[in-house]
Amino acid sequence: MPPIKIHGMIDPHTHLRDLDWSHKGSFASETKAAIAGGYWAVFDMPNTAPSTIDDALLSDKLARIDKSAYCDWGLYFGASQADNSAEYESIASRVCGLKMYNNSTTGDLLIASSAMRERHYRAWTPNRIIAVHAEEETVANILDLVRKYRQPTHFLHISSEYEIKLLTQAKQDGLPITVGVCPHHLFLSEDDLPTLGAFGLMKPELKRKSDQRALWRAIRLGVVDIIESDHAPHTIAEKEADEPAYGVPGLETTLPLLLQAVKDGRLDLQQACDMVSLNVQRIWRITPLPKTYTLVDADYHYLVARDQLRTKCGWSPFEGMRVCGKVLEVWIRGHKVYDGDQVLSPPGFGRNLFGFVA
């Protein structure tokens, strides 16, 4: 078939690292990886040390990524255990949303108190989305807050049948929620852990095959809005340590995995494209400027291998898997930034899609 044209691919769930964790990845290396994966823009999470939880830290991070990014971008602000909601009025216009960690994850931003979660929901602006890490029963707790405050909320990396059941009902009830699912939960399960070892560890963890089937069913029914990578690079040494880090990279493998699912008859091509472009644009209310698109050869098959990857960590949990889809070109704002082999944009080319750099 002729190349597929996807307008404005966005990954709204990435951990680009840099700052104190630049040994894992940098704004430069991971935005290059994003372009090679076909993306126009990526949104970066706030839990890289130092966590993005006050105006000064946000301003510093904005300035750093503005000088380094090869693609367009947005930053999340982090809800803090210490209640930093007084900062919201001054920072909301400069970020893509508020990230709230309600279950254990990398970093120190866990908010376990229902009362504290409610304080953040009450204070946040409705003009920017709240993106939540919530698992199992915590999903129900967050849904109670959505019912009370009608705050648009995106549920990140949903991974279980029970969570899907709760969110399906919430959508039927008309709550302002959206749902994201990650490729590792769609294409890997706990059955892969004996082979993957620590390279299959992430939060939320890999689940049962029955949970995986529930995710695919929810995609077919339209309950799942977007596919997000939760790109979270760690070095090989960190994954092989006695206490391995949780998280896996995914910016360069998301699109090929989805196109392989299309080839296998598990997914409709238009839906696959929409879940990495139009649906994300709709949820975050942004529109790509003209000539912002990706061309992909969907007939190109290959095995995922380390030597193909641009992410600084240099590995993938999908190594050895057969996928299809070679990114031929990426265009951003009328500029050709990828030619199928090399990233052509300069550092600092990327723009903040949410306000201005402070």
Image: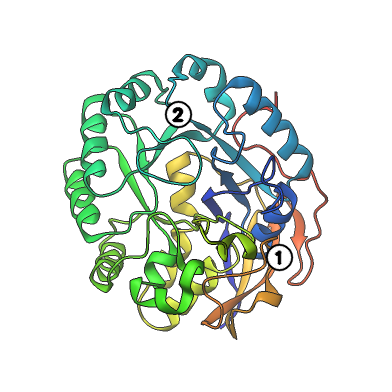
Instruction: Identify the residue at horizontal 42%, vertical 34% (top origin).
Output: 129
- In this view, 291 is above or below 54: below
Residue nearest the viewer, comparing 314 with 33: 314
Of 338 and 250, the residue lying toward us: 250
Figure quadrant of residue 123: top left
Residue that badge 1 annotates: 310
Q: Position of residue 179 (x, y in %)?
A: 34, 50
Asked if the residue at tag 1 contacts the one at tag 2, i.e. Cβ–Cβ closer than 8 Å, the answer is no
Query: In the image, which disc is placed on residue 79?
Result: 2
- Which of pointers 2 and 1 lies earlier in the amino acid sequence? 2
Q: Amino acid at mark 2?
A: Ala
Q: Is 27 on the left-hand or right-hand side of 226?
A: right
In what element is the residue under mark 2? loop
Q: Residue at x 62, y 34 (%)?
A: 50
Left or right of 237 on screen, residue 92: left
Residue neighbourhood size for the residue with mark 2, other residues' Cα within 10 Å, grouped as few (<14), some (14–19), many (≥20): many
